[in-house]
Amino acid sequence: MSDLQFKLKHAFYPTPFKNSDTPPYLPGFVFSKNYGIPDPEIEKPDQLGGILLPGPAFVSHGCHYDYDPADVINILASTKKNMNYLEIGVDQGNTFDKIENVNLKHGVDPYGACKNITHKMTSQLFFVMNKRFFNQKYDIIFIDGMHLSEFIWTEVIESLKILNDDGFIVLHDTCPRWEPSQLVIEEEYKKILSTVISPNEQERLNWHEVLWDHNSKLPETDMIGYNGDAWKLLPYFRAMKGRSPINTVFSIPNACVTIISRKRISAFEPKDNINSHELPLQPDMLTYAYYYDNFERIMNPFTMDYFKENINET
């Protein structure tokens, strides 16, 4: 068994590895529906609503959250008239096809299986083409493409340029529930490169067929819940507040999303701000231990119920 396979096979237990100098993985989180009520007069429950010690039963269902990103997006859409919607990373259309109350709906994905994709191209090409030829602006932009912080950083910066002043950017997969789900593993991306991004369209698999392949030989277990390292960008976006078009950043952990707004929304103000001087120069230097210890500061988390009740506040 390779070192990688050993780590993954034992990653779900918060106990020291046997016969290994590798420290134990930190346990994961339960995102309680009652967690995150931003009322200073109410004592919050234990951090993140309690600690989850993931076992094998969670491995096959590691991406399950209580709410779908489409639930969040449709609530945002209900605050708009004649909404223009853009989705980066459509894949099978599991979110894209559920978005309602739109005037214009564009989907960008070079390899997605959804028949409703409007722009079969990479996000980089789309942003350049839009700047030069389309000149289209959007009210909501959902980013759910490659789950690597380097891609997401560029996509957020470019999205801010084409986002209407009262618009929202929604980032998916920003709230990993345990350490393995935010690992960026070379072998997994090699598999993606040879399947999802196959030159032969007939041989391509979609993301879910790759990531949830129960017969996969890599690793020697079912695929863990996949989030990537998008979360590492959140403290940097929060630190940009007031020094960039970003004025509000908050998360809904039970939907695994983070919302960025150009406007200041007082109902979602954080308890404290993050100073760029306290962050490392590169996001990939952040560790899961930092995420675990600073969850509230990084995420600025709120419940779905609170979000529904207060998103109309400006």
Image (cartoon, grey):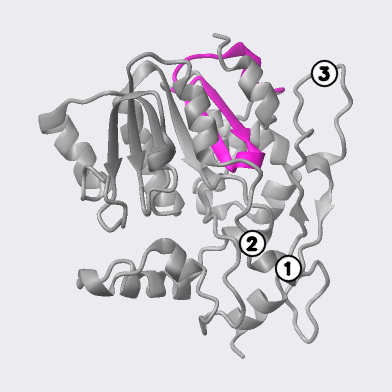
Amino acid type, mark 2: His
Upstream in the sequence, badge 3 or badge 2? 3
> Where residue 231 sits: x, y (%)?
56, 46
User: As drawn, which residue projects farthest toward the top?
Assistant: 314
Q: Is residue 141 left or right of residue 295?
A: left
Provide the secondary structure element on which disc 2 rests. loop
The answer to whether residue 236 is left or right of residue 152 is right
Could you say which quadrant of the image residue 49 lies in?
top right
Furthest-left residue in this view: 133
Q: Position of residue 35 (x, y in %)?
A: 78, 34
Tell me the number on the disc at residue 57: 1
Q: Residue at x 35, y 69 (%)?
A: 205
Q: Which residues are magenta?
A: 246-271
Q: Is residue 251 magenta?
A: yes
Q: Quadrant of the N terminus?
A: bottom right
Q: Nearer the viewer, mark 3 or mark 2?
A: 2
Q: What amino acid is at disc 1?
A: Ala
Q: Classify 286 as above or below 129.
A: below
Q: CA distance from mark 3 to mark 2?
A: 34 Å
Label 2: which residue? 61
Question: Which label number is shown at residue 40?
Answer: 3
Q: Are marks 1 and 2 in contact (CB under 8 Å)?
A: yes
For residue 279, which quarter of the picture?
top right
Residue 311 relative to residue 139: left or right: right
The residue lying furthest to the bottom in this view is 1
The front one of 248 and 82 is: 82
